[in-house]
Amino acid sequence: MSVGEILKLTRSFNWGEPNIKKLEGLLRNLVRIEINRSEILEAYAEIAHFCENGGRTKPQNDYWIAATGKATNATLLTTDKHFDDLHGRFLERVFVDESSCMQ
C-alpha cells in the first residue's frame, strides 16, 4: 500500500523517469509487510478508533501505515504531520522536513 502511494506521488510531483527508477531501486531494498496479519488488523482498529473518537480523522492509508508501524515496532519516517498525535502513544515517528531533502 505504501509503495503504491509513493509511486503515485512520484507521478503527481512529475519526478521524471530517471528519478522514479532510482526510487524503485531503493524501494526494492525495503522490507515489505503483509497487512493482513492479526496484529496489524488489531492495531488498525485501535488507532482508527482512537483517532475518530477524538475527532482526529486521517486518510485511511495513514491508519494502515500507523498500524503496521505499531505492530512491527518500526519507527515511521514521515514528511507530514498526520502522525503527530500518535507519536509516543502508538508508535515512534521521525518527522523529515521535505525542504532539507530537496538540496
Image (cartoon, rainbow, N blue to C red):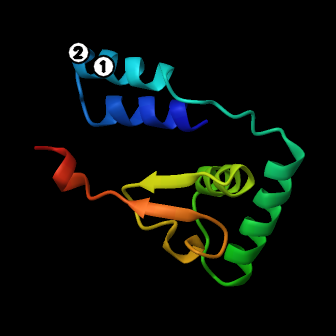
Helix, strand or loop for disc 1: helix
Q: Which residue is mark 1?
A: 22
Q: CA distance from mark 1 to mark 2?
A: 6 Å
Left or right of residue 101: residue 79: right
Give the quadrant of residue 62.
bottom right
Q: Which residue is mark 2?
A: 18
Residue 61: x and y in percent read 61, 49
The outermost residue toward the left is: 103
Question: In this orientation, which residue lies closer to the viewer: 51 or 99?
Answer: 99
Quarter of the image where the N terminus is located? top right
Left or right of residue 53: residue 32: left
Q: Is residue 95 above or below residue 16?
A: below
Q: Amino acid at mark 1?
A: Lys
The outermost residue toward the bottom is: 54
Helix, strand or loop for disc 2: helix
Question: In this orientation, which residue lies closer to the viewer: 94 or 63?
Answer: 94
Rendered residue at 69%/58% (across/down): 70
Question: In this orientation, which residue lies closer to the viewer: 39 or 63?
Answer: 39
The outermost residue toward the right is: 38
Residue 102: x and y in percent read 16, 44
Contact flag, marks 1 and 2 (Cβ < 8 Å)? yes
Q: Amino acid at mark 2?
A: Pro
Left or right of residue 23: residue 71: right
Residue 72: x and y in percent read 70, 49
Rendered residue at 59%/30% (across/down): 31
Rendered residue at 40%/19% (across/down): 24
The local crowd at label 2, few if under 14, some if 14 to 19, many if 20 or more residues have their Cα within 10 Å, is few
